[in-house]
Image: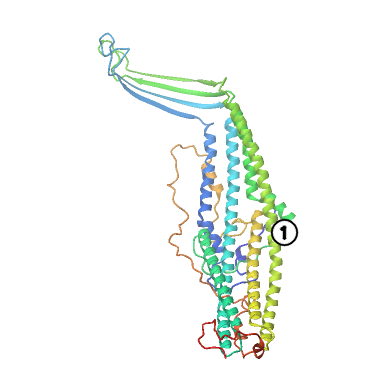
Amino acid sequence: MRRTYLLAGAAFGLAASPVLAVPAAAETLREALVKAYNGNPTLTAQRAAQRATDENVPIARAAGLPAVSVDGGYTENVLSASNGNSNSFSSPNRLLNSSGSVSVPLLTFGAVRNSVRAAETRVDAGRFTLRGTESDLFTDVVGAYMDVIRDDAIVGLNRQNVRVLEVNLQATRDRFQVGDLTRTDVAQSDARLALARSQLQSAEARLISSRENYVRLVGTPPGTLEQPPALPALPASPDQAVDVSLENNPALLAAQRARDATAFDIDVARAGRLPRVSAVVGGVYNNYLGSLGSGTGVRVGQDSLSAQGGLQFTIPLFQGGRPAAQVRQAQARRSQAIEQVTEAERGVIASTRSAYAVWRSSQEVIASSEVAVSANKLSLEGVRAENSVGNRTILDILNAEQELLNSQVNLVTARRDAYVAGFALLASMGRAQARDLNLEGADLALYDPVANYDRVHHRINDFESDPEPQAVASGTRETPAQTATVVQPTDPSLNSNVDRGAAIRGAPNPGAANRAVDRSGANPAGDAAPRR
């Protein structure tokens, strides 16, 4: 029984474990997926490619339908030397003629039938390819969406860290002025602030890159993004995930259908060396426009009409080895398609197992990072308290702050990795298309490739065409360049370092006077006053 994994509808709302608090007007993951579904050029181009594939069926079927043709011409005889007479029976001055024929294939030994079957099979393969393109796009959008959320949080944490270290540096300078700390303490605070600023610059660059990638995929700037919904229950083991993937992965199914089509291609090639029988009906009409026998005094009819009908046989005897070469070529291409199925199967198994492993490991990293964040909070508080009585140095506090920041960044990153890997696992299992995600709604009508096939596969009118192609996806040239502006994190697990400089701004540390100091009186912090 087919299991369905639902990810959308009412589920596309709030996340179970938020990273950022966002306003009510924030964009949701569902909205991002809908925008990409409606306007991503990769997906709209693949839909057009599928429509082109649909046309191969009527093209193949046309070879088995009657062919009707009409020929005509007008001839003016500009030179005649017959008995010195320019008008004669053998060389009339002018001729208007027309002919028509109808040819109906009767026997092709399977060439037409197998061509149609091959085309229909490739239509099926194209539909699976379209599903795979849709699934890959959604996986990319989810990754870009989570990248923005992650990098937004990391930039907020780094900016907050810079502000805290700026306060720490100022407090260290103040205590240096009163002789409570050494120039080394000031230098350590100054160096740590410089490092934090460089980390902030790198984080801002990554955030801008993530936002630009989001624009590339979705078509609009991300703005403020709401936390994604929780993923559905995923398989309990990699083997279970692989079993589902081998049954439903669209890339694998497309490769299998493409392989099946090549069997019909071999039969088509073999039919090229067999006889063909057609029924032929034709007619010819000639009119000499009064020039036949002109000048001879003999009155003759100036027009004629004839009709013919019969069977036409084509029996190939020798074609220079062309049919045999076509058969061998079709067989080689079938061998290629068989190997490509194996390759696709290997890829599906590897990607499924990899996504499952990353998802499970990310879950463990989340749990460990949450413990680390809690422990680093307690550690920072303890180091502050011990610093106030002289048992800890400024460097100890700076290190504790950095460790807390690192654990918070690790937690944000692990949450992103777990969600993206979980969605990639759904995609590998063939459960990440718009229909699986319940995206259909008032703002989205699902694209149905079958509708176009039903529209065209029996068309026989030679003079039909579709409207002139127009762009479906919009460009992003007018989209403003993205910046690193962020919403400040308010989640308690990511906000524990607010105002962390309070311990350093407290009363002078009496134990600090016992540490080794630089007696030169120089002030590396740039203060003019000497140490006392």
Instruction: Return the x and y of residue 199 as percentages of the image width and height.
Output: 57, 70
Q: Is residue 45 above or below residue 108?
A: below
Image quadrant for the C terminus?
Answer: bottom right
Residue type (three-letter) at the residue carrying disc 1: Pro
Instruction: Answer with the quarter of the image where residue 360 lies.
Output: bottom right
Q: Secondary structure at mark 1?
A: loop
Which residue in the structure is indicated by mark 1? 235
**On screen, residue 238 above or below 390:** above
Residue furthest toward the front? Answer: 520
Q: Nearer the viewer, residue 382 or 431?
A: 382
What residue is at 69 percent from the left and 83 percent from the top?
382
Does the rendering let one see residue 21? no
Query: In the depicted view, which residue is nearer to us: 225 or 157?
Result: 157
The residue that appears at 65% across and 77% down in the rendered structure is 399
Q: Residue 110 in the image: state x and y as whole percent.
A: 60, 30
Q: How is the image coloured?
A: rainbow
Q: Position of residue 189 (x, y in %)?
A: 59, 79
